[in-house]
Amino acid sequence: MGPEPTQGPLSLGPIQQRPIKRATLYEELDASVLPSRHRRPESKFKPMSRHARNVRLWLSVKSSDPILLWQRPICSGASTGPCLSSDSNQLVGTLISIFTKQPFSQDAPELRNLASTLTTRVVESVLNRLKSWKVALEFFSWASSQSGYRHNCYTINAMAAILSRARRNAEMKTLSLYLVNSQCSISPGALGFFIRCLGDVGMVEEANAVFERVRDSGLCIPNNYAYNCLLEAISHSDKVDILEARLKEMRDSGCALDKFTLTPVLQMYSKLGRIESVMEIFDVMSDRGWLDGHVLSIVVICFSKLGMVDRVFELIERMESQNIRPNERTFHTLIHGLMKDSRLDAALELFDKMKRSGFTSDISIYDVIIEGLCKNGQLKSALSLYLEMRESGIRPDSVLLMKLSGFFSEEQIIQLLEEFPEGMDAKAVTLYYNLLLNLYVKNGLVDKAHRMLCLMIGADSDSNGHNADIAELIKLKGTAFVNTEAFNIIIGALVQKGKLDSALSLFRDMDQVRCRPTIKLYNSLIEGLCNSNRLDEARELLTEMKGSSGPDPTPFTHNCIFGCLCRREDVIGALEMVKEMRMNGHEPWIKHSSDLVKRLCDKGRVSDACSFLEDMVQEGFVPDIVAYSAAINGLIHAHKVDQAVELFRDLQSQGRRPDVVAYNILINGLCKVKRAPEAHDIFKEMLQDRLVPSIITYNSMIDGWCKIGDIDKALLYLSKMSSEAQKKDPNVITYTTLIAGLCNARRPGEALTMWDEMKKRGCEPNNITFMAMINGLSKCGRPEEARLYLKEMLEKGMRPEIYVYVGLLNAFISELKFEEAFEVLKELLENESFSEHRDKAYTAALRDVIVNLGEDERTSSGIRALIADSQIPALLDILDNRVPADILHNRVQNGTGGIP
């Protein structure tokens, strides 16, 4: 299509947009004086801003300006094409025949003979009669390359009209380049037409650039029509600066501003919500008698979008006084906007005005108003409007009826559906019945819907005694034509309710009415059967599908059965299904494979899980890392840590990239078996893989180092996780692990510091944290501090386990602080939490504590008092049976103590 320019297509060559100096513009405008006859009359609207006054000034119309009518260009089209001689008409027909023949070749001999006879009128006529934009563009390109022929502005416009209608923006951009580089003269009307073609497809920048390039090159002197077309194109965008600059340029060039100049300006300001500027332009147009329904629509829609409902009605009344009314589209837009803003009263008022104006409503208007009335509780008005809609010949659609079902009773909806309009054919009646079935299902009346469908097809239902009401409905209207959609509705609902037997029975009845089951029906039934573990019946349906009359199984079909086999832990059956899926080009879903591996590992069948993964790879389906993570976790729980590491390494050697979860599982497993150094190596690999360790990763490593007594490395990991690079906040598990580790390392002071840091960070200790601190301090010979934490723990409503009491009691006794130990024992007896524990090691230790306290003269009387109050015997019931309770009782009472 001619030589391509070297400049970028968007700028259309070396075009520079002139900068807009707004201050200078306003200075010029302020120098003007608006004639008094152009001033707007007093209005209820607010005083205008300075910007609005300036707009009014530069939009002022001279008294000498003519009132121009909108002159549309001579459009290139079949009906308005150039008159041709009979020879030229024959040539047009021949060219069309050649270019529409397939396959087409530009090297065809007949084309070479016809090239010399080309004229612009012939080319324009051919373009107007070609139906395909591709063929038209091919013909246009061919013609432009013929020796002695050159396109003119009319052939270019014919091509532009075709590409614009087809919305071929890329080709329109190329055509724009061709126009500005072809140096062909172009009339103002033709320029305006081309600009409008660009504007119709949103190519505003290109339209502005073409206009400027053509004008500056002297190919065209734009008139007011060309400017109007450009302003109209710009108004489709938000480029108000360009629009104002072109408007000023138009006025400065001597072009008169007319109705069709101001309309796109009004459109732009309305879109931007510049209400004062809108009203100024509106008043100017009103003064010149340029108002019509389209102008009114622009302004009232602007008011509506800004929520200025009162002004909408004020403006409509003002226009009606001048015998100008909104058009139908405006009414529709306003009503929808008002309903969106929940202005029901205003919408109803406008709806009445619309009807009085003689305009008809469509289903969307009735839909939005009826829904609004229902939501507002005006059900009678909604029903009345619904009946009015029916009487006007508008049939309610499924969307409206489904909305009504949420507000009206079942009986009311059925009544509405029973009142079929006259003259409805069988398919329309079927639609209504399907709507009724849908409503039954939506309202939970699945059984009733099921009975209705059974009666419609003449099948037996489960509740014949309750069918009188539905039978009357069917009898009244006759048996409707039942289609597959009715079965889809009911069978799907029955499956969801778990009524699989009824669903299967209805499925078999489809043959009676010659309805073929769809893939949706098969999948719904197979899914329901598999979810209910009725695998054999699901397989029967799958076999049916694979027959000659059934639909082809989908990936969903196979995966339903595959999932059921996985839930059954049927490894052999699952692998057989995988093979079948491979033959059909379907892939097994990852979630089912992972679920099977996890189930097998939970049951201790780790070897079977690993074998399944290997078999999946053999079938060409590499399992997801989630499945491998489950297998690694299973091996660790089965105390096969070395095999878990080996599987992890195998994954890496195959190019698989373990995720954070897989790393966490392996690191945690190694740390649990006191192999923290190996876990540390895995941690470093994780960082090398550019994975970000989680809080779980750090907690596992801290626990691992604590387990082997290397508390300093554990603290180092705490520093790493809190560093600027990681920014992981330690949680209660982190602090609990470190507190226990520090106490085990005989560093209770640091444990107490860690506790304070934890609380300072806003991390509240839990039950396990308190027990770790109390037990740790007791082991470190600091029972007084431990008791303070015990007191705080009890005050928070937490209950320590018995080993915490035993450790604290032994710590006090080791310090020969028998009175404090006795007080702790009393707290234990009051708490009675020990009654849930029957660990022999702790009960034996508790027995020794009681005996020791009974032997000491400072606490023996207290022990005897507890025995007298029957508190010790309750405790003795859970003690080691090596010493009968009565013997222990006598020893304590007699002060002869010890256990042999």
Image (cartoon, rainbow, N blue to C red):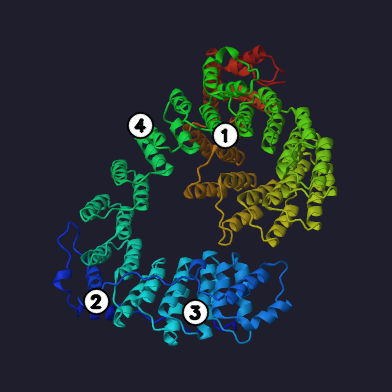
Q: Is residue 641 left or right of residue 444?
A: right
Residue 153: which disc? 3
Question: Looking at the image, is mark 4 or mark 2 nearer the viewer?
Answer: 2
Circle 4 SS class: helix
Circle 1 SS class: helix
Q: Is residue 337 left or right of residue 767?
A: left
Q: Say which residue appears at 57% left-offset and 31% top-offset.
A: 426
Instruction: Say which amino acid is labelled 2.
Output: Asp
Q: Residues within 10 Å of mark 1 (few under 14, many from 20)?
A: few
Which quarter shows the N terminus? bottom right
Instruction: Say which amino acid is labelled 4.
Output: Ser
Q: Say which residue appears at 31% left-offset and 79% top-offset.
A: 255
Q: Is residue 858 left or right of residue 709?
A: left
Instruction: Say which amino acid is labelled 3.
Output: Cys
Q: Which residue is mark 4?
A: 384
List x then y, in percent, for residue 7: 54, 83
- Depth check: give the residue in front, 181 or 161: 161
Q: Which residue is mark 1?
A: 427
Circle 2 SS class: loop
List x then y, in percent, for residue 573: 82, 35
Q: Residues within 10 Å of mark 4 (few under 14, many from 20)?
A: few
